[in-house]
Amino acid sequence: LVINVQPNVISPEITPQLVINCSITNNEVQEIDVIKSLTLSRYNETVAKFDDLFVLNSSTLDLKQLQQFKFSQVSFGNLFITLSLHNPIQIDATVYRCNANGDYSKGTNISKFAKKAVEWGKNSTAFIEEIRRLKKYEKNCQCSLKKDKRTEINQRFKYLNYNKKEEYTLQSLFLLHGCQVQTSSARLKRSTVYPPSG
């Protein structure tokens, strides 16, 4: 019995999708002789319990959807359920559970589960605002890099205490067009960055 999440940390405005896979390997679960169903659920902090999202009947392969998602895609088959959430939000950062139900030699209705947590990126309001601003700016940016001249970029997006992935993301958006962007010196550390020539 396996549950996988990709990625395990949701970065606001960056993570395009969250994929949760609930599956049974080799068509068997320890201590369960007859597998009847597979259930994918997630933890609801408001009511402090797990809410079932999908239930797959192992014999008929009938999938029952118990929760609705605005932007999602689900695939299923022989003892697996895969849920893809597009543009995940903070509520999607929680604990997901894969539950196998069935019978065993000494009785009926035995259940085994596996859990995996998805975290929400740290409080990065300024970072999110800058990403949104750059995306909006990118649509209107008419600059282009010239092969015979390096374009000097006066702002290097290096946030204090932010990780390399976030810094690289901002730089990539910025260097895409080689345009100069005015930023608040109160929020950013200033330095000079040159885009690659050619």
Image (cartoon, rainbow, N blue to C red):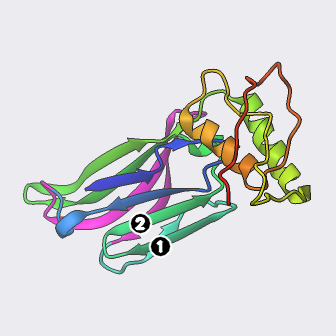
Mark 2 is surrounded, within 10 Å at the Cα level, by few (under 14), some (14 to 19) or many (20 or more) other residues, namely many
Residue 13 can be seen in this image? no
* Residue in the picture at 59% in, 58% down: 85
Please say if the residues under marks 1 and 2 sit with CB atoms less than 8 Å apart: yes
Question: Dot 1 lies on which element?
Answer: strand
Quadrant containing the C terminus is bottom right
Look at label 1 and name its amino acid: Ser
Labelled disc at residue 45: none
Closest to the observer, 136 or 72: 136
* Residue in the picture at 76% in, 29% down: 126
* Residue in the picture at 67% in, 29% down: 158
Q: Is residue 15 left or right of residue 8?
A: right
Question: Dot 2 lies on which element?
Answer: strand
- Counting residues from the start of the chain, the first of labels 1 and 2 encountered is 1
Q: Which residues are drawn in magenta?
A: 30-57
Look at label 2 and name its amino acid: Ile
Q: Is residue 12 left or right of residue 105?
A: right
Quadrant containing the N terminus is bottom left
Residue 24: say if magenta.
no
